[in-house]
Image (cartoon, rainbow, N blue to C red):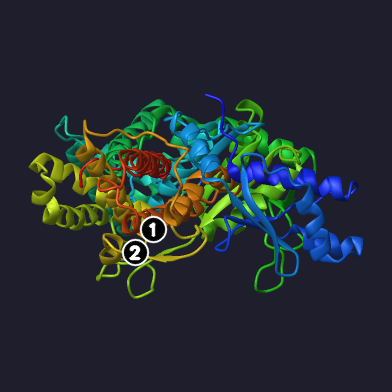
Amino acid sequence: MAPVTSLTASVNQRLAVALSATLPEAVVDPLLRRSDRADYQANGILALAKKAKANPRELAAQVLAKVESGDLLREIEVSGPGFLNITLTDKAITRNLAERYADPDRLGVALAEHPGTTVIDYAQPNVAKEMHVGHLRSAVIGDAVVQILEFTGENVVRRHHIGDWGTQFGMLIQYLDEHPHELDHQKSDDLQASGEEAMSNLDRLYKAARRLFDADEEFKTRARRRVVDLQAGDPATLAAWQKFVDESKIYFFSVFEKLDMEIRDPDIVGESGYNDMLAETCRLLEESGVAVRSEGALCVFFDDIKGPDGNPVPLIVQKSDGGYGYAATDLSAIRDRVFNLKSNTLLYVVDARQSLHFKMVFETARRAGWLNDDVKAQQLAFGTVLGKDGKPFKTREGETVRLVDLLDEAIDRATTVVREKAEKVGLTEEEIVENGRYVGIGAVKYADLSTSAVRDYKFDLDQMVSLNGDTSVYLQYAYARIQSILRKAGEAAAPVAHPELELAPAERALGLHLDQFGETLAEVAEAYEPHKLAAYLFKLATLLTTFYDQCPVLKADTPAQMENRLFLVDLTARTLHRGMALLGIRTPEKL
Ligand code: ARG
């Protein structure tokens, strides 16, 4: 399907033609905005008049005289200090929307002109550890960005940089070696159950190993020796390490499944995946002079990064004992992503508290020539999840909240909400359970995605599953309500566009917003800002509510009007469905 030129783009183009016919040298953006007075207002003439030392109202009138109205524009007039108010014909609006409707997959939205390859690093929990709300944010934001970029035609490579390496594995492996049955459990087909069990075994083992490590000097020595064996690639030690990784993955996959999110095994390339590159990364940095030896460690220094004492804080790529850390791994991952995966954009969906690390890593990679003007890296930093009290989210005992507990509670609450209406809507028990999951998980995702990622947000389940306000369930109801109308219309009437009909104000407002879907997505993809998509969808649902108040659908005046309104709501439903899917949120047919 050919993409549909948006109404905004068409109006813009006509204005631009008229502008350059009036002042040939001028390159101006007409600065078109949606407006309450007309469909659009163009403000760009003001700046132009200033430059040309002309009277803005006169200039506006000259431009107006040159605008080709055709079938597109019904009215155009000068207003205020030199604005142009523009009203479209009803026919142009309905025709444009009908073209979108004819393309159910993409709704007429164009692919990006120059797609590239983006590697996105997200959903990166740590082996043998519980997942917490920070991991939730990375997964939810990352997954939305993946879906949105793929929709624009970008080639997206997903990387889950899990924490699967480090000295703590010496302790864990040694303990397992001395207590060989601690990770045994019954294999079950139920992913959720196995995931829970895997984690509770790992957690128990971790705590026991830690206790022994702190109390028993001899165990500590044996554990340290294990780290050396692990780094040297001793097969038995590696096999034990693999067991921890596999067990943890069972758990991760169960959480991602609960989150209704597809995470693929080959995309999990954890810290250990770069072990073979670490020595070379250090050699390249040292040979090029980007990194220097300082007190035995290999370091990179920055003019603008200093500690509280005023001394420079270096990025340590290799410790004085020869060990490699987080930074060496990330630098090696950059080389892999740039040179092997051939990406032009590297994204990192990681907690804002790691911003200094990424600033130093990116700057180092730039100095080494691995990143440059054509290959960019960016951290999509996210803020902290707060409790209702505005403090970082903790249990009453002061522990980090287990992600699974949180998700289960969200699903519980949502199921209650769904159940209240279930009888009226005619839901089976099975549908109640399924919708409860979609509403609960949707609520959690939407709350995360509807505020700008860098900001902290409060995890407030009452608010999240509320039917009123900017919540996913409000959007899900908007969608389900349309489906119910379409079912009621049934055989009697089908959605059909009627460009000859006059549009009511609420229909225009809805239609013009529907037309903006593609432009919104382009902006969202460009700046990696899913919250702007959430805002667009919320506005769409609000406009739909106003439309219902003012424009009866099943009781429309004429059959043609009913068909046209069915068409409008169906296009709205498709746009809601597509937009929500890009945010990773389901839209049940009945709710
Ligand atoms: N595993 C890390 C954590 O839980 C996040 C990894 C982020 N990605 C990266 N390439 N460093 O904090």
Q: Is residue 227 left or right of residue 26?
A: left
Residue type, mark 2 in image: Gly
The residue pinned by badge 2 equals: 469
Which corner quadrant of the image does residue 458 belong to? bottom left
At which x and y percent is residue 552? Answer: 30, 52
In this view, 278 is above or below 25: above
At which x and y percent is residue 352? Answer: 53, 59
The residue pinned by badge 1 equals: 542
Residue at image point 25% right, 70% down:
397
Residue 159 seen by the camera: yes
Residue type, mark 1 in image: Thr
Residue at image point 56% right, 43% down:
525
Residue at image point 38% right, 74% down:
390
The kind of secondary structure element at disc 1 is helix
Mark with earlier residue (1, 2)? 2
Tell me the tag on residue 14: none
In this view, 298 is above or below 466: above
At which x and y percent is residue 269? Answer: 47, 33
Residue 316 seen by the camera: no
